[in-house]
Image (spheres, rainbow, N blue to C red):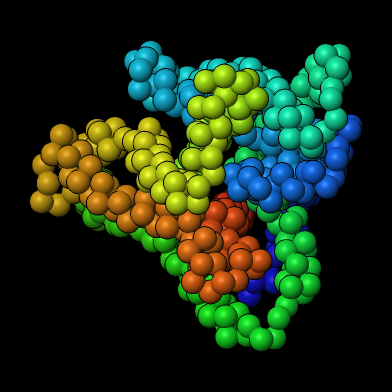
Amino acid sequence: MWYQKIIQVFKIRDLRSKILFVLAVFALFRLMANIPIPGINAENLKDFFNQFQMFGLLNVFTGGALDNLSIVMLGLGPYITAVIVMQLLTMIFPQLERMYKEEGEAGRQKFNQYGRLLTVPFAALQSYAMLTLFQRQNVIGELNPTILLTSILTVTAGALFLMWLGELISEKGIGNGVSLLIFAGIIADFPNNIRQMIVTWDPARIPSYLLFLGMALLIIAGVVLINEARRNIPVSYAKRVRGPRVYGGVSTYLPLSVNPAGVIPIIFALSLMLFPSMIANFLSGAGGQIGTIAKQVGVWFEDPWVHGILYFILIVLFTYFYTAVTFDPKAISTNLQKMGGFVPGIRPGQSTASFMYYILNRVLLIGALFLGTIAVMPSIVGGITGVMSFSFLIGGTSLLIVVSVVLETMRQIKAQLQMREYETF
């Protein structure tokens, strides 16, 4: 039973200490998310988030740290942006690609170090742009150069501190630190959403609520189904005789996930979409032709149709891009050939790699379309049912992150439990 697994987890000292460490990091993150920078106008801040939909979505990924204008209001955005840029650069600079794909663990560590260093200028630039935008919207008071510089350094340090916490969680081996911190922020906002449900309850709209609930359950089932779906490629191993022993001669399969990229494409797409909107809002007060163009771009990006279509397209593209960077059928084909494995009916080597590309591209289409649909689903369901205040139930991006992180964390904890059972045996 599930409760027996929980008891077993907390009986193992090493695993218990890892879980308690992650919970302590969550508590520290929530504490920092509620320490605001000085001079905030709460009423103007509320109006700002009601006006700009994009920043409301960004607030989900910062765990409510942005709408508090806390010292960690950027969340992990600068780090994610730096990772995106580094991944894109692998397509331009072959040396970076070799470092990431061919130099093993040492190469990936060096690649990740470049990403950390790139996070610093991104965090400083984003904090300056955000603070300047909030000043122009009268969300915070006018900051003199000394206080502005201090605030930029504080917010930048907060972003780097969160990046460090995320990597500490990843080192513990029970989940991806970045995803878990985003998960913690989303979960922390659930009590406010439930309170909003109670406050806005209207008995006359019960049919709409029931329709909404039915669609929510359907979407949750779809999220779980796609996250767990696999396309199995059969693999056989030739028999090899070495002395008196016979090796190989077994059949197994290579599982290809329908959604191999997880929630990363959604996070990438959101981070990329923030830049034009942020820069447009930043330049809108410049005056002249630049200011006029910036205002038009800002209005264009705030249009729900434009936002939804761009968001969907970027998610689909990033799903293919991220999978192409992290999953290499040619390398898998080479490794299979070295170990005497082959796909029945397919020649080893290049033919096997081509076959895997063929399967992957078709499976990936389902996963990419699914991710894009889930991301824009709150707006669609809200428009059909007219129930916008409960959108966290069908959640879209939030729901996908919560379900994906829970499933992945449970999978890693289960793997550690099984590993300890084998060691005992």
- Residue drawn at point x = 41 percent, y = 49 percent: 309
- Residue drawn at point x = 60 percent, y = 79 percent: 209
**269 left or right, relative to 399:** left
- Asked whether 309 or 158 is in front, the reply is 309
The C terminus lies in quadrant: bottom right
Where is 3 relative to 100, above or below?
Answer: below
Q: Quadrant of residue 102?
A: top left
Residue 284 shows in the view = yes
**169 left or right, relative to 210:** right
**76 left or right, relative to 419:** right
- Asked whether 223 or 298 is in front, the reply is 298
Q: Position of residue 206 (x, y in %)?
A: 63, 85
Residue 24 shows in the view = no
Q: Residue furthest right?
A: 38
- Residue drawn at point x = 86 percent, y = 14 percent: 146
- Residue drawn at point x = 77 percent, y = 29 percent: 135
